[in-house]
Image (cartoon, helix red, strand yellow):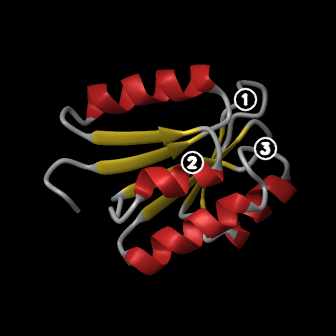
Amino acid sequence: MHEKPEIILVDHCAEFRIALKKLLYRRFPGARVSEANDARAAMLAAGNAVPDVLIFDLEADPFGSASVVNLVRHAGDGVIVIALSGYAYPEYRQAASDRSADLFFCKSADGFANDMI
């Protein structure tokens, strides 16, 4: 892990990215948070950097998210991968697991659920 955490945040909702980014900065002052609205932009944001944490929304790019996770996993073994979704249904948890996420977090207040995968 870097002295100051390197975090990549991928979510199609700008308002959510802004809110989560503020929360991350509050919890981890000095963290470097790169944000993107989809998987392609995330891969560009990552560049050659190996993040400590990848936070991605399953809906941001249903096919690209897997490639972002694979890219990050190959770059560094210790990367923490957190999958987000607005839905707590089992198929979304399974999609997170299929993408090798370490954690699943439901963003919906109605379906609030966190899972270690």
Q: In what element is the residue under mark 1?
A: loop
- Which comes before the other along the chain, label 1 or label 2? 2
- Of marks 2 and 3, the one in the foreground: 2
Query: Circles 3 and 1: CB distance less than 8 Å?
Result: yes
- Which comes before the other along the chain, label 3 or label 1? 3
Q: CA distance from mark 3 to mark 1?
A: 8 Å
Q: Amino acid at mark 1?
A: Ser
Q: Is residue 51 left or right of residue 102?
A: left
Residue assigned mark 3: 88
Residue assigned mark 1: 108
- Residue 39 rendering spot, x and y as whole percentages: 63, 53
Q: Is residue 28 visible?
A: yes
Q: CA distance from mark 2 to mark 3?
A: 26 Å
Q: Nearer the viewer, residue 97 or 31?
A: 31
Q: CA distance from mark 1 to mark 2?
A: 24 Å
Quick one: which residue is furthest to the left in this view?
3
Local crowd size for mark 1, using a 10 Å CA cut-off: few (<14), some (14–19), many (≥20): few
Q: Is residue 37 left or right of residue 95?
A: left
Q: Quadrant of the C terminus?
A: bottom right
Local crowd size for mark 3, using a 10 Å CA cut-off: few (<14), some (14–19), many (≥20): many
Residue located at (53% from left, 64% from top): 102
Residue located at (69% from left, 34% from top): 112
Q: In what element is the residue under mark 3?
A: loop
Q: Is residue 86 above or below residue 15?
A: below
- Residue 86 rendering spot, x and y as whole percentages: 75, 36
- Residue 99 rendering spot, x and y as whole percentages: 67, 68
Local crowd size for mark 2, using a 10 Å CA cut-off: few (<14), some (14–19), many (≥20): some
- Which comes before the other along the chain, label 2 or label 3? 2
Q: Amino acid at mark 3?
A: Ala
Residue assigned mark 2: 41
